[in-house]
Amino acid sequence: MSILTFITQDQLDELDEDPRVAFMQLANHAQRSLADQTKGFDPREEQEWRELEDLRHSFVNVLLAAAKRFEIEPFASMELPTARNFDERSYRDFKDNLDHYITQLVIDNSTRMRRQSVVMPPKTRDNICTYLHELRECVEKSSMSEAKRQALLDRLDAFQAELEKRRVNLMAVSLLIFDIIAIPGAVWASYDITSRLVTNIMQSVAKARAEEQEKKQLAPPAEFKALSPPRKEIPPTRHEAASKYDLDDDIPF
């Protein structure tokens, strides 16, 4: 089985550029796919049990390979169990490690996203919605190609949807502004109006951001902590150590 057993090519193409985020996205896609493919399997039926074990082994194989490519520890250093040595416990241990890592990563990303977004006061949100409505009219009246017009209208729709969220991603603002200012001024029915609307949006977002930062009065953000493995090696007891080397229980120290 290949990686495409658990994730589509389109999903691969859309993975984030950040290796840690990309690994998390890939793992989420793969877990959902595995759950869908094994839904209704009866482990008491030998054939279905074998198919379940094969899919789980392939799932672990794909994620370990991805971890090596993305340099994600501790998975990048793990060895893939052979099919003969792979069982329910092997899968459970791997799944526990994966869940432990993903939990830390989700929390890290949540913290990062808060720093890269801003809460829009209701009045500011309403003002920006008005600017977007007027921008839409500017786009529809422009002389740009139909494909470019539709792409820009889609970008406006995406930003409108972003405004409905509690926190607005600053990257969404940047992408909208970049797409608009990349259009030559000659294609706009009124470049001055378009420019004014873009400026109004930028100023509204910047003001909301400044007010939020002033309220928080945050110190410079600390570095993200390194993600830790779920378990630490526990040293064996003296009795276990003796048993390992076939020593008697009486240890002379």
Image (cartoon, helix red, strand yellow):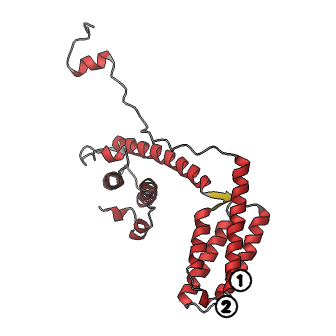
> What amino acid type should be assigned to the residue bearing mark 1?
Ile
Alpha-carbon distance for marks 1 and 2?
A: 9 Å
Q: Is residue 88 left or right of residue 18?
A: left
Q: Is residue 194 above or below residue 122?
A: below
SS for callout 1: helix
Quadrant of the rendering where the N terminus is positioned: bottom left
The spot of residue 137 in percent (x, y) is 70, 85
The spot of residue 174 in percent (x, y) is 59, 68
Residue beneath label 1, please?
Answer: 193
Callouts 1 and 2 close, C-beta under 8 Å: yes
Q: Residue at x 22, y 11 (%)?
A: 248
The residue lying toward the viewer, choosing from 69 and 201, is 201
Quadrant of the rendering where the C terminus is positioned: top left
Q: Is residue 139 left or right of residue 94?
A: right
Furthest-bottom residue in this view: 143
Residue 119, visible in the rendered structure: no
Q: Is residue 154 left or right of residue 126?
A: left
Residue beneath label 2, please?
Answer: 189
The spot of residue 235 in percent (x, y) is 34, 23
